[in-house]
Amino acid sequence: MFVRPQPFVEAIAKLGARHPVTSRLTSEQWREVPVALRERAFFSSRVESARFLEAARSALNDFLAGARETLPNGDTVLKVGSRADFIKQMQDFATASGLGDALPGQGGDLDSRRITNIRSAGRLGLIFDTQIQAAHDYGYWKQGMDADVLDAFPAQKFIRVIAVKEPRLDHAPFEDRVALKTDLPFWVKINRDFGVPWGPWGWRCGHDVEDVGREEAEALGLLKPGQKIQPVDAPFNRALEASTRGLGDKALRWLGESFGDQVYIDGDTIRWKTASVESPLPPGPRPVLRPAPRVGRPHPGLGLAADPSLATAEEAAIVNRPSERALIYGPDGAFIRHRDARPESPLRVELTAGEIALVRRGFLSHNHPSGAAFSLRDAIFAMDNDLLELRAIARSYDGRPRLFRLIRPAQGWQLQGRGFEDLARSLVAPARRSARSWARSLSLPSRAAEARFSAEMFVLLRDAAPGIILFEEHVL
């Protein structure tokens, strides 16, 4: 049975609430604009064409909504079915409108790689990526504020999902940390570029968040057993107005000079002139996540050597564990020892040099309280240390325990380092789409797709490199 995906209504509403604002401001100068105004503005650095911005917003909205059109031959197709479609349509629009490089004297060559060229694939791809991710991440955050979702998954973990050439030093102290979703100061402190408690978490940032369940959050001391947590209304941009208290005359003059009659200042508030006060969610179903029952132990296997597709007794014992535990097995599949995460970092296991030596050419398993499969860091560890197999046991959003396996090919790990990371990076977008389709097919909220993302990533890696990436998933 094929299930037609439902539009991500929260993301659509977020994009629809943004008003096209033209300006010669650079990206750095836009950061000086109050967060409440930025969050309600659809803009791109140095773009002064309102028609271009409106066309771009309309195309992105069509992509999010899955809007369709009927061709002259009677075929019905998506108006904007992909990132490539968006780039092509906006290049055609920019060409017809005579738009080119935002900097004088640079020309308007479509093949130009200058990010200032509004017709270049690089610039248009950046607009697509930033706006779609911002809409999606706000949508996930909004769904996460549903009372039932918040009760079941009150916290989230800041994790790296993509390796980047130049990791942000200011994000390093927050990596793998867990905090309540309602701890707005904590999440805003991470997001220095955009100043909001949801992603994107910064320009060219490879981080994201994953849900943390109530049991784990209580074990971490973030809330007391049974304590109710109330959804929060973010104090950003309510009714498209930002308080101007504390803004001096110089700042107000700068805003007026930068945006002219597009901005309206009235007493203690400032807002975009023609934007609507509210942008209600469009009609349609908005599924929410209900607390899943506690998952029982899967049937223990007979040992790794006997049947690696079954959970071992040691794996069965940790499937519901709120903190991570690593299990070390020898080359013959016999259990050797375990290593627990430290109390101050319960979601990260650090093996000693001796334990790493033990696991080389052996098997390493661990539990993932988040329900996810492997991170890219997990896979790189397996390759660097020549593991026979990396395993993870997790409780999935659909309420069923799963065993994930990354198996060393007979000829050894052939795809390593930069080659593996580049391939994985190219599959991020399709993996996210697959994860969302999985969640929708089970009537789970879009937020559930985040936990599923890593499994879909390794399925695509396996398909892209058959015989080189050996990934298996077993429902227990």
Image (cartoon, rainbow, N blue to C red):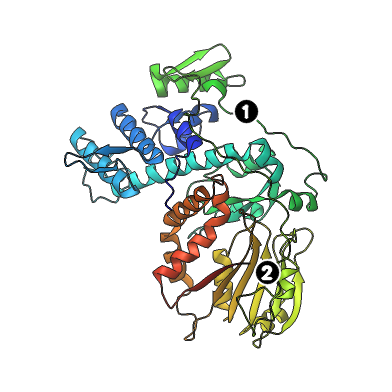
Residue at the extreme top of the image, as rendered: 267
Which one is closest to the eye, mark 2 or mark 1? 2
Q: Does residue 193 show up?
A: no
- Horizontal side of 120 relative to 364 (left or right) equals left
Q: Which residue is mark 1?
A: 235
Side of 121 where 266 appears, left or right: right
N-terminal label among 2 and 1? 1
State the residue lying farthest toward the front.
Answer: 1
**Residue 121 vs residue 83, the one in the foreground:** 83
Q: Residue at x 21, y 46 (%)?
A: 109
- What kind of residue is marked 1? Pro
How far is disc 2 from disc 1 in space, using C-alphas? 40 Å
- The three-letter code of the residue at mark 2 reads His
Q: Which of the 4 image quadrants contains residue 58?
A: top left
Q: As drawn, which residue projects farthest toward the bottom?
A: 332
Seen as rendered, the residue at the extreme left is 73
Residue at (71, 51) in percent of width and height: 293
Left or right: 401 in relation to 215: left
Number of residue marks: 2
